[in-house]
Image: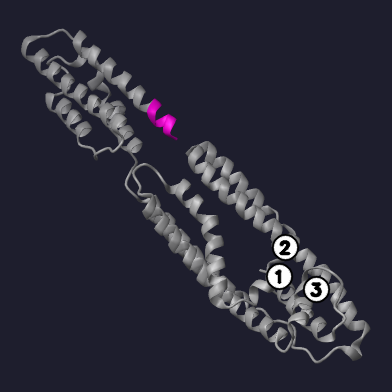
């Protein structure tokens, strides 16, 4: 949060913050939560809500330092103002006492705000970066490349911002030492200045962070409860066939009169057929073939019990179901 940025009107800061948050969050949101069954426009709208919420909270938090910095440069001409803003970041302390005082006041915003952070976080500022990148690698392993890429993109962007913020703070800290030394060496030349900036209490910052977390967490939970993907549906249909409850129904030597009741076979096929519609044409055709094979299996059981047909045909259908199931697994694995 640079001093030049803090001096801008609220609507400029809101637009810039929202644009930066959009660049940061939109790719992550689309990659991490997007799939073939989700409208990307809906996901973009959700990400937009997060972006606007974060930007609005940021502007609210910035209002106090904005007013302080505005008061610090009040009465300075354009040249003095430029000197003060530059001195906060780099260069020698300005010779003009008014510009020097303004630079010290604006630099105190960052230093005093920094004191609100826990000491362990200041010392271990690199720890969140390490945790985020480690989390991205775990997501690559557990959720696939698409979600892993989304989270890694977010982790790298946040890491870059964190590193830049740390570098910027160290530069300002060094400059403030020079500015304070310059002001102390010429106390008679220093005009009356405002008291050093006093940041808001930690409780207010905690409330803002909680609200931001609630917005992001709520939308994340909403996305997590969305309808299953095509692969989820296809695998659930396949799971009905291979689960332990129906294990005996796959054995050809049990399709005779002394095997499971015919109603069990019929219920098995009906459960496989009752599934949500799939939008992926390839998976839809394979799942349809799977349910057709289940119906064929039921017909074979009926004929066997009525006319004593050979179980070889049933075993052949079971093998086709297994082959189709393996094909579905391969398709879903390739899509992850």
Q: Earlier in the sequence, mark 1 or mark 3?
A: 3
Q: What type of secondary structure mainly makes up the magenta span?
A: helix
How far apart in space, not on screen, are marks 1 and 3 (Cα)?
Answer: 19 Å
289 on left or right of 35: left
Name the mark nearer the viewer: 2 or 3: 3
Q: CA distance from mark 2 to mark 3?
A: 24 Å
As rendered, which of 9 and 157 lies closer to the eye? 9
**Residue labelled with disc 3:** 87
Residue at mark 1: 114
Q: Which residues are magenta?
A: 330-336
Residue shown at the point (20%, 34%) measured from the top left: 271
Can residue 239 be seen in this snapshot?
no
Q: Nearer the viewer, residue 330 or 85?
A: 85
Which residue carries the number 2 mark?
A: 122
Q: Is residue 199 left or right of residue 174?
A: left
Give the number of callouts. Answer: 3
Q: Are marks 1 and 3 in contact (CB under 8 Å)?
A: no
Going from the N terminus, do you reach mark 2 or mark 3 first? 3
Q: Residues within 10 Å of mark 2 (few under 14, many from 20)?
A: some
Residue 309 is situated, as x and y percent measured from the top left of the image, at 12, 9
**Which dot, 1 or 3, sits closer to the camera?**
3
């Amino acid at each position: 949060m640079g001093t030049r940025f803090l001096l801008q009107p609220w609507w400029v800061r809101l637009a810039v913050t929202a644009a930066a948050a959009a660049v940061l969050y939109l790719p992550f949101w689309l990659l991490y939560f997007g799939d073939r069954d989700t409208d990307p426009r809906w996901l973009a709208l959700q990400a937009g809500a997060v972006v606007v919420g974060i930007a609005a909270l940021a502007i609210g938090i910035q209002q106090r330092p904005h007013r302080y910095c505005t008061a610090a440069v009040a009465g300075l001409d354009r040249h003095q103002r430029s000197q003060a803003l530059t001195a906060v970041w780099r260069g020698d302390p300005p010779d003009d006492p008014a510009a020097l005082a303004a630079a010290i006041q604006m630099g105190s915003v960052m230093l005093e705000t920094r004191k609100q952070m826990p000491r362990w976080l200041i010392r271990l500022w690199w720890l969140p970066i390490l945790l985020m990148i480690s989390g991205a690698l775990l997501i690559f392993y557990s959720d696939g490349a698409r979600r892993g890429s989304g989270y890694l993109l977010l982790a790298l962007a946040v890491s870059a911002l964190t590193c830049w913020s740390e570098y910027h703070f160290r530069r300002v800290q060094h400059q403030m030492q020079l500015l304070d030394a310059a002001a102390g060496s010429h106390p008679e030349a220093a005009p009356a200045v405002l008291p050093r900036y006093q940041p808001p209490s930690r409780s207010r910052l905690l409330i803002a962070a909680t609200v931001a977390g609630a917005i992001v967490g709520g939308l994340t939970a909403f996305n997590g409860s969305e309808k299953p993907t095509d692969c989820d549906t296809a695998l659930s249909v396949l799971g009905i066939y291979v689960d332990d409850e129906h294990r005996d129904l796959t054995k050809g030597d049990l399709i005779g009169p002394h095997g499971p009741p015919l109603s069990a076979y019929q219920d098995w096929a009906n459960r496989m057929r009752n599934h949500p519609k799939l939008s992926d044409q390839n998976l839809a055709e394979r799942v349809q073939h799977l349910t057709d094979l289940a119906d064929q299996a039921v017909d074979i059981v009926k004929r066997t019990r009525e006319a004593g047909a050979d179980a070889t045909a049933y075993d052949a259908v079971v093998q086709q179901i297994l082959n189709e199931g393996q094909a579905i697994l391969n398709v879903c694995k390739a899509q992850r």
